[in-house]
Image (cartoon, rainbow, N blue to C red):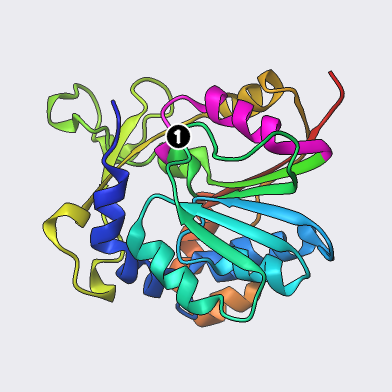
Amino acid sequence: MPLDVRNIWNACGEAFDRYTTADDSFSDNIERPVIETLIGNLTGKRVLDLGCGSGPYSLLFAERGASVVGLDLSETMISLAQERSRGLDAVFRVSDIRKPLPFEDDGFDLVFSATALHYVDCLIPTMTEVARVLKLGGVFIASVLHPMSTAQFPLADSENVEGPDPWEGWYFGSHLRCIETPWLGFGDVSKEGRRIFCHHHTISDYVSSLTSAGMTVTQILEPSPSADFAVKNPARYDEAMRIPIYLILVALLRKI
């Protein structure tokens, strides 16, 4: 089932941007420190950011010396990214990462994606495209919502589900999930953006799709919140300690 990701994110993108850049955001306090450590110096590297959103990681890569291309399906998100990228070597395009990527083979040293792959139904075609546009020896870094987290999302047809309350978690079974937008309090969100439909993938789904595309998984990381986060927001810290928020995968394009 194709998801209407474009209209959802055009409706709630600005609120999401404020939510994820707040001082106590999961992204800035759990995900970003790991990404900053993984990428190192990117001087002279060409980087592709899939599902770039408002561009926080694209801009980080450009500041680290990379030439960056960011893709996102939402015009709202691309507009925010373009406004912030002035003076940096970063360009942004409206594009659907679920479709063939609009680039020639072997063009990027690093392909990156943060919390976008749960909008992709079938992972293998997307990972195959990632491998195609990577240079031999290039790296793919994917930060995804941890499957233990998305397993807590209600099933999309939860009104017809027999058994326990869907919020108790369904790790296996139907992978189409739906949640109320968590960032409703961060801006005006029209009805199109008040519910998020997405796909729940297991850890083995992610790993097997990477290996099927000819990449070798070199790191699997499950970052936990730091003690500093407990000071900023004890409730969010406790939530992140109970259920992991992110799964970060690092893969290398190997010789076939």
Horizontal side of residue 30 vs 181, given as left or right:
right
Q: Position of residue 91 (x, y in %)?
A: 57, 63
Magenta-colored stretch includes residue 129: yes
For the question of whether residue 225 can be seen, the reply is: no
Residue type highlighted by circle 1: Arg
Horizontal side of residue 111 vs 255, given as left or right:
left
Quadrant where the N terminus is found in the figure = top left
Q: Residue at x 74, y 49 (%)?
A: 110
Q: Residue at x 57, y 74 (%)?
A: 229
Horizontal side of residue 256 vs 150, given as left or right:
right
Magenta-colored stretch includes residue 85: no
Q: Residue at x 30, y 60 (%)?
A: 182
Q: Residue at x 68, y 23 (%)?
A: 213
Q: Is residue 147 above or below residue 51?
A: above
The magenta segment: 119-137
Q: Position of residue 156 (x, y in %)?
A: 23, 33
For the question of whether residue 142 can be seen, the reply is: yes
Q: Position of residue 50 (x, y in %)?
A: 55, 48
The secondary structure type at the circle numbered 1 is loop
Mark 1 is surrounded, within 10 Å at the Cα level, by few (under 14), some (14 to 19) or many (20 or more) other residues, namely many
Horizontal side of residue 58 vs 72, given as left or right:
right
Q: Is residue 251 above or below residue 55?
A: above
Name the residue beneath numbered marker 1: 98
Q: Is residue 196 above or below residue 45?
A: above
Q: Position of residue 52 (x, y in %)?
A: 51, 57
